[in-house]
Amino acid sequence: MPQEQAPVPGTDKRQAIESARTDTTRGAGIRSMQQLIQLRWIAIVGQLATIAFVHFVLGIHLPLVSMLTVAGGLAAFNLASLVFWRPRQEVGDAVLLVALLVDVAALTAQLHLSGGITNPFVFLYLLQVALGAVLLPAWAGRVVVAASCVGVLYLVASPGPVTLAADPARGIADPYVQGLLACFLLTTVLAAVFIGRIARILRDRDARLADLRQQAVEEEHIVRMGLLASGAAHELGTPLATLSVLLGDWRRMEPFTSHPDLQQDLDEMQTQLVRCKSIVTGILQSAGDARGEAPAHTTLAVFLDELVSEWSATRPVETLDYRRELDADVPIVSDSGLKQMINNILDNALEASPQWVGLDVTREGEDGEVLRLKVSDSGTGFTAGTLADFGKPYNSSKGRPGGGLGLFLSLNVARSLGGRLAASNRVPNGASVVLELPLASLALPGDTAGENDLDDADDE
């Protein structure tokens, strides 16, 4: 029987990013349709006001029934569009093209009934062309241009029931000149407002897609790092075991047995070796090649206390100012990825400030649904460039190869859990890194953040 093919690392993440890209494009389409609907309502009101002014004030007799029928049909189309598209999230280019072509057809009909090519509002075709150029791809924009040209040629070739006289020599007193001014004002205002809005929608979409593309690149980078780390962890198993055996032999040999200082050095070496084994085990567990147990069920307070105790015991920190202020404890599921993320942040603070590291843990939000960890140090702080590119790979001021990966990995783990990671400088010196995670992402299956709270008798 054929063997099942193993999933490619990162495939699910790439599929999620592609889905987010599609959702972003759809969101821009529906927002553009909403702008067209709003613009069409303004056009209908403007048509009715212009028809009434020309017919009753200027005394130019227009075919009111036919023109009101066109305006009523356009209003019915706009109402149907509003009802149909409001609950939906997807609007494609073809739909936007059809909507613009309906607007071009309605404009052509109204102009044909009210003076044809002699109507000064003929320049409203330019607004339709501009909207098509902004909203649609190149091929669809050319369709709108072609439709507008056909409309103008139709007005030239087929005079309507009304002919408007023009006498530009009269200046502002001439109705044609007045119409030109009104058309110019209307076109410029609508173009500035609505095309500006649409352009902003498209810029937001492009910015979102750029962020997603950057995230995809970072995820691919993490996948490659994970493969390399997993391979290195497998290879490190044998030399670590050999070192453990050698240390055990040295404990029983001269001159180590007769020198307490050497025995103390061996104890320290053994402690660091155990730590290396623990790191290798964590890498293999995270890669799905577990040497230990599955992610453990524990509580938030117990998890944090054990993490802090282990970290302070294996790092040369002089003072760890640990403050846990939780109103109530909650059950969570801990895994090596979550633990390593917090350790990475603490390690960075320790490297900047070996004398003092602060860790403040609180629950934020109305119902305490957000876990907030603030890691502080008393070092020199982040540079402006490091803060601007915070979370990017190899963004480090330490000047060594591979620097800056700890915070990069921590940021991506936080993002995968629905959280966020932010950095800032402290006054007068030092830096702070704040990690915020929704407790729902750490909760036991079937639990929600805030439920099944446990009494935390040992809060500090």
Image (spheres, helix red, strand yellow):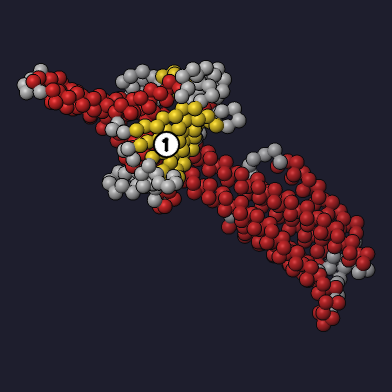
Label 1 crowding class (10 Å Cα cut-off): few <14, some 14-19, many 20+?
Answer: many
The residue shown at (40%, 23%) is 305
Say which quarter of the image contains residue 162: bottom right
In which image quadrant can residue 190 be found? bottom right
Of 128 and 281, nearer the camera is 281
**Residue 363 position (above or below residue 252):** below
Q: Residue furthest bottom?
A: 169
As drawn, is 362 to the left or to the right of 296? right
Lateral position of residue 109 relative to residue 131, left or right:
right
Residue at position x 40%, y 46% from top? 429
In this view of the protein, can residue 98 be seen by the observer? no
The answer to whether residue 26 is visible is yes
- The residue to which callout 1 is attached is 375
Instruction: Give coordinates of residue 6: x percent, y percent.
Output: 37, 28
Residue 330 screen position, x and y as percent: 51, 21
Residue 54 place in picture, x, y as percent: 89, 66
- Where residue 233 appears, as percent x and y from the top left, is 27, 29
In the picture, the quarter occupied by the N terminus is: top left
Total numbered labels:
1
Vertical position of residue 288 compared to residue 97: above or below: above
Indicate the secondary structure of the residue bearing disc 1.
Answer: strand
Left or right side of 230 for 189: right
The residue shown at (84%, 51%) is 72
Q: Residue furthest left?
A: 254
Q: Residue placed at 44% from the left, 50% from the top?
A: 388
Type of amino acid under label 1: Val
Q: Nearer the viewer, residue 159 or 386?
A: 386
